[in-house]
Image (cartoon, rainbow, N blue to C red):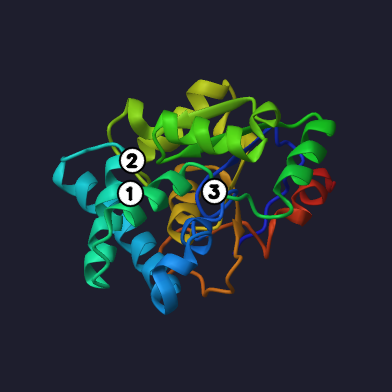
């Protein structure tokens, strides 16, 4: 980790899933249907979701993140022999209404009070992101919601991070990028963002050439980090 000064930050750009929104909330709200395998199903669902984005990017076979999410769920339910169509639909519906992590709304409000614009840059499709932000009540705190869908490729392709530069009209080094996904933090750092890895789950750093610049356990400390001289 190579810490850098963040006082020139004009915009805080956030990954969505796993950073602002709890991806495991969907199964948690339906644990009575899934039983003792609920946590394992959720973990596999997330793992396959990410794997499918990377594989589809490498193969040049893009489908939007909603299709990826459904395909990953189908794999996971099949793995655990859950064939109930109603449960499948309930889980997909729940993914459009994920909970935010507890500190998220307050942190976004504090950043806005500091004059920092806030945006999402996500693999999610536009309709997914609109739905989850509206459901969580944070839409009014966001200046932009940017999806990879316009490029038809997923993170960590550098062109995805360029979307934020172009869409927000600021230089890469004026963007603080926050992600709880270590691979995403590495991709953003390689591109040229100042990166805060929100290491919610106490994971080790990735063994790749570029690393994050700051590490937090949740987003609570971000406004103070941005404001430090």
Q: Which quadrant: the N terminus?
A: bottom right
Mark 3 sits on what residue?
98
* Mark before the other along the chain sequence, 3 or 1: 1
In this rendered view, identify the residue nearer to me: 78 or 211.
78
**Vertical side of 179 occupied by 216: above or below:** below
Within 10 Å of the Cα at label 2, are there few (<14), some (14-19), or many (20+) other Cα atoms?
A: some
Q: Residue at x 85, y 46 (%)?
A: 229
Q: Position of residue 50 (x, y in %)?
A: 34, 56
In this rendered view, identify the residue nearer to me: 64 or 37.
37
* Spatial CA span between label 3 and label 1: 13 Å
* Spatial CA span between label 2 and label 3: 14 Å
Q: Secondary structure at mark 2?
A: helix
Q: Does 96 sit left or right of 84 as displayed?
A: right
Residue sticking out furthest to the bottom: 36
Q: Residue at x 67, y 35 (%)?
A: 138
Q: Residue at x 68, y 60 (%)?
A: 218
> In which quadrant of the rendered view does residue 168 lie?
top right
* Spatial CA span between label 1 and label 2: 5 Å
Q: Position of residue 178 (x, y in %)?
A: 59, 49
Within 10 Å of the Cα at label 1, are there few (<14), some (14-19), or many (20+) other Cα atoms?
A: many
Q: Residue at x 38, y 60 (%)?
A: 46
Mark 2 sits on what residue?
66
Q: Does 161 sit left or right of 80 as displayed?
A: right
Mark 1 sits on what residue?
69
* Mark before the other along the chain sequence, 2 or 3: 2
Q: Contact, CB < 8 Å: mark 1 with mark 2?
A: yes
Q: Secondary structure at mark 3?
A: loop
In this rendered view, identify the residue nearer to me: 131 or 106.
131
């Amino acid at each position: 980790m190579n810490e850098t000064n963040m006082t020139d930050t004009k915009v805080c750009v956030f990954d969505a899933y796993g950073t602002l929104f709890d991806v495991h909330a969907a199964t948690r709200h339906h644990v009575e249907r899934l039983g003792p395998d609920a946590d394992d199903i959720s973990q596999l669902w997330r793992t396959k979701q990410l794997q499918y984005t990377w594989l589809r990017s490498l193969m040049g076979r893009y489908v939007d993140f909603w299709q990826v999410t459904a395909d990953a769920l189908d794999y996971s339910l099949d793995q655990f022999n859950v064939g109930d169509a109603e449960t499948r639909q309930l889980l997909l519906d729940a993914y459009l209404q994920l909970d935010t992590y507890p500190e998220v709304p307050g942190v976004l409000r504090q950043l806005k009070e500091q004059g920092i614009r806030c945006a999402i840059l996500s693999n999610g499709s536009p309709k997914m992101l609109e739905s989850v932000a509206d459901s969580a009540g944070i839409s009014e705190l966001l200046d932009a919601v940017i999806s990879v869908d316009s490029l038809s490729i997923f993170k960590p392709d550098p062109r995805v991070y360029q979307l934020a530069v172009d869409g927000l009209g600021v230089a890469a080094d004026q963007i603080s990028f926050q992600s709880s996904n270590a691979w995403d933090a590495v991709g953003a750092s390689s591109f040229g963002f100042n990166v805060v890895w929100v290491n919610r789950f106490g994971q080790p750093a990735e063994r790749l050439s570029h690393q994050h610049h700051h590490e937090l356990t949740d987003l609570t400390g971000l406004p103070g980090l941005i404001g430090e001289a």
